[in-house]
Image (spheres, helix red, strand yellow):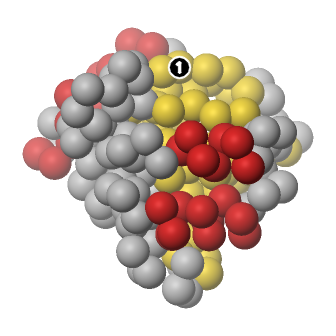
Amino acid sequence: MKIIVVSDSHGSSASLKEIIKRNSNADVVVHCGDSRGEMEVIKMKYPNITYYEVRGNCDWGSSLPLTVTFELDGFKYMATHGHAYNVKFGLGQLCYAAEEAGVDAVFFGHTHIPCDETYEGIRLINPGSCGGMGATFAVVETKDGQMLTNIASLKKGFFK
């Protein structure tokens, strides 16, 4: 199973569209907030993909949830923007919420800084910002009970 994780597009629909176009074989796309509704066009163009979205701090008036949890291919995931867990000041609150939710991995954004870390067995994946030409995103693939992750850039390809 292939999951594309994006966040913080902030109106840069060209980069977001290019990421999805290059990964149109994905099974799932997760947008971790600050999308300004840009996913609606993507959903219409690629209806065969499953989508999960959350509300970011710049998604004013959005009815999207702050956090979603879902299970795919034997793994449980949580997606959030991160502002509600103060991720700009550390990942402690986010880690606690992930432990409470019993997830294997948490996807988050808000900082615009990509990361892929493990805390007490929980993967913490921030795809960075998919806005602009240096747009970054995460590719998560599951196979045979393993989760493989890479942070990629539109400009440079994979850099992890």
Is residue 130 depicted above or below 93 in this figure? below
Quarter containing the N terminus: top right
Q: Position of residue 80 (x, y in %)?
A: 38, 32
Q: Residue at x 45, y 72 (%)?
A: 135
Name the amino acid, label 1.
Thr
Is residue 135 depicted above or below 149 in this figure? below
The single residue placed furthest to the right in the displayed view is 144
- Describe residue 12's horizontal placement relative to residue 46 as left or right: left
Q: Could you say whether the residue bearing mark 1 is in a helix, strand or loop?
A: strand
Residue 147 in view: no
Q: Residue at x 21, y 28 (%)?
A: 84
State the residue in front, 117 or 48: 48
Give residue 44's quadrant in the image: top right
Is residue 128 depicted above or below 68 in this figure? below
- Describe residue 78's horizontal placement relative to residue 70 as left or right: left
Q: Position of residue 107 (x, y in %)?
A: 46, 40
The single residue placed furthest to the bottom in the displayed view is 156
Residue 17 in view: yes
State the residue in front, 100 or 84: 84
Give residue 154's quadrant in the image: bottom right
Q: How many marks?
A: 1
Q: Residue at x 73, y 27 (%)?
A: 72
- Residue hosting label 1: 69
Quarter containing the C terminus: bottom right
Q: Residue at x 32, y 56 (%)?
A: 10
State the residue in front, 124 or 25: 25
Q: Position of residue 62 (x, y in %)?
A: 33, 26
